[in-house]
Image: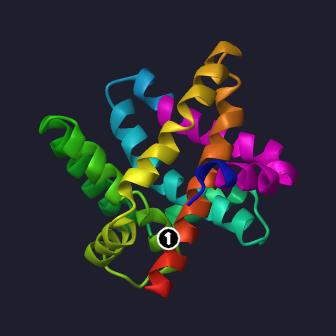
Amino acid sequence: MNLLYLMRQSREKLKPHWIIAVLVCFIYAIAVGVPTELNAYGEFLSYLLAGPLQLGMSVYFLNILNERPASIENLLEGFKPLLKVLLVYLVISIGTFLGIILLIIPGIIVSLGLSMSFYILFENPDLTIEEVLKESWNLTNGYKMELFFLHIRFIPWYLLGLLCFFVGIFVVMPWHQLTITMYYSYLKEQKAIN
């Protein structure tokens, strides 16, 4: 796949939504980042919010991709299947952590392989946790390296965002998120063809 073309397409699709998308990403970052600084329980609270908010962001960007109404309220949709979301997030976190302990590369592979889990969970709420994770792994099978390079392409943009008093990061985040969402759609198409 032409990753630069995908990034351009994503930026064009995001144009009418950019302000709200920045706000959605800002709310996510604050909700997940701030509690860890508050007190001893803050890290636990941050963990409890991260999974559902990640699912909510997936819903928001899938809505943009599929030209459905997208709003800040989409973030709350991640709290509906709460237990399942928390367990999916826990498995992804543990798998990534264990992979990182095993010389970093396995952690990256696990993270990439399970990165489509929240999209799959939203589109297929009846799947079990194991089925969601397996589906994500199978969907990314043969595409993990390309997905890795897609993420890498955003690093210079994030660095540029840091130079803009950190505000630029919240402009890059929605673009990155929508691009990954579009890549998820591409992976589904490839699976349907094969």
Amino acid marked by disc 1: Leu
Name of the residue lying farthest toward the left: 102
The answer to whether 139 is drawn above or below residue 16 in the figure is below
**110 relative position to 10: left or right:** left
The x and y percentages for residue 122 are: 51, 72
Q: Residue at x 53, y 30 (%)?
A: 155
Location of residue 181 (image quadrant): bottom right
**105 relative position to 77: left or right:** left
Location of residue 66 (image quadrant): bottom right
Name of the residue lying farthest toward the front: 2
* First to last magenta residue range: 6-33
Q: Residue at x 58, y 42 (%)?
A: 28
Quadrant (top left/top right/bottom left/bottom right) for the C terminus: bottom left
Q: Residue at x 73, y 40 (%)?
A: 22
State the residue position of label 1: 187
Total numbered circles: 1
Name of the residue lying farthest toward the right: 16
**164 relative position to 190: left or right:** right
Which one is nearer the viewer's eye here, 152 or 126? Answer: 152
The x and y percentages for residue 163 are: 66, 13
Specify the principal SS of the magenta part: helix
**164 relative position to 96: left or right:** right
The x and y percentages for residue 164 are: 71, 16
Q: Residue at x 61, y 45 (%)?
A: 176
The answer to whether 41 is drawn above or below residue 20 in the figure is above
Location of residue 13 (image quadrant): bottom right
Magenta highlight on residue 28: yes
